[in-house]
Image (cartoon, helix red, strand yellow):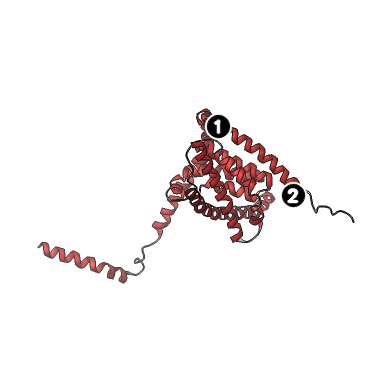
Amino acid sequence: MRWLGWLLIVYLMLAGRIVFRDVWTSFPLTPDPLLVLGILVILRLESPYGLLWGAFIGLSADLLWGDRLAVLMLSLATAGHLLSGVRDWYASGRTARRWAAASLLATAVLLVRAGLERFLGGTAPDLEAMALRAGFEGVATGACVLALDRAISWIAEAWGQVSPAVSSNK
Amino acid sequence: MTAKRTPSRAPRAAANGAGKVFAVLAALAGALLFVPVDRARPVRELARWSLEPGVAFLAWARDRGGLLYAKAIESVPPANALRPERAAADDEPARRTAARDEESLR
């Protein structure tokens, strides 16, 4: 049931990216909603399952919109595995520490993705511009990860209160 | 002196599991990186087709939400509606301007 809930969230995020595309693209450095969700599953789920879900989300996004397959998938899997230690920071209850963990992971994913795209595209990487953009976008993505985490927790709590009442009515 | 045992082997086992999963994922992604997108076109079309119900639902929810918002905004009375004397005071400059324009036309 829990996996079904995550699958529904991923599906709605993918569909929402199409429907609300104008909103996402109207601001500069707006975080990619699928990157936000990918980082959230890596940080929130248990160790191998988070990687699997992150890779699935990355592959879905690249399959639907990417110029190349599996760039986001490889970025999420690599950064998520190499920086798996930040999951402990995220598990702590402090908001600033959680934000730092999410931002660090997001920045790493964006750096790996930009590096991969440059490498595969055959162009020389402009490291300073890449790092600056990844840093700014990573911090914004980290904030969105926290917001989405809070929203999902609220929905889960509400469902937890509603679900026993529904099952007792049957 | 007895050798100390490690406190728990569970984290190490979990790390090994994650390493294997990562190796499989990295190999799969590395192979997919060099697949041309054109060859995945049927899969892409299938994925887009499977998203259609979700897109239709979210578009309906967006339009419905917009309609409800517009209706809620319409139902709110303007700030002057509850205070006629204030509304008249607000309209006074416009009324004076209109009267002056009429006079100048005559």
Which mark is first along the chain, 1 or 2? Answer: 2
**Residue at point 64%, 38% (across, down):** B25
Query: Secondary structure beneath disc 1?
Result: loop
**Residue at point 14%, 63% (across, down):** B102
Quadrant of image for the N terminus of chain B: bottom right
User: Image height check: is A133 above or below B86?
Assistant: above
Asked whether the residues under the numbered discs 2 and 1 touch, taking CB atoms below 8 Å apart as contact, a structural biologist would say no
Q: Which residue is mark 2?
A: B11
Query: Secondary structure beneath disc 2?
Result: helix
Q: Amino acid at mark 2?
A: Pro
Which chain does tag 1 point to?
B
Which mark lies nearer to you, 2 or 1?
1
Q: Which residue is mark 1?
A: B34
Which chain does tag 2 point to?
B
Please tell me if label 2 and label 1 are on a single chain: yes
User: Where does the image place residue A39, in percent across and percent down from the top left?
Assistant: 59, 48
Query: With B93 as the anchor, is A164 left or right in this view?
Result: right
Residues A60 and B38: in front is: B38
Q: Amino acid at mark 1?
A: Phe
Quadrant of image for the C terminus of chain B: bottom left
User: Where does the image place residue B104, in percent across and percent down from the top left?
Assistant: 11, 64
Mark 2: few/some/many CA within 10 Å (<14, 14-19, 20+): few
**Residue at point 59%, 50% (across, down):** A105
User: Image height check: is B66 above or below A68?
Assistant: below
Question: From this viewpoint, which residue is outermost toward the left?
Answer: B106
User: Where does the image place residue B35, in percent across and percent down from the top left?
Assistant: 55, 30
Q: Quote the CA–CA distance across marks 2 and 1.
A: 35 Å
User: Where does the image place residue B58, in percent across and percent down from the top left?
Assistant: 50, 44
Mark 1: few/some/many CA within 10 Å (<14, 14-19, 20+): few
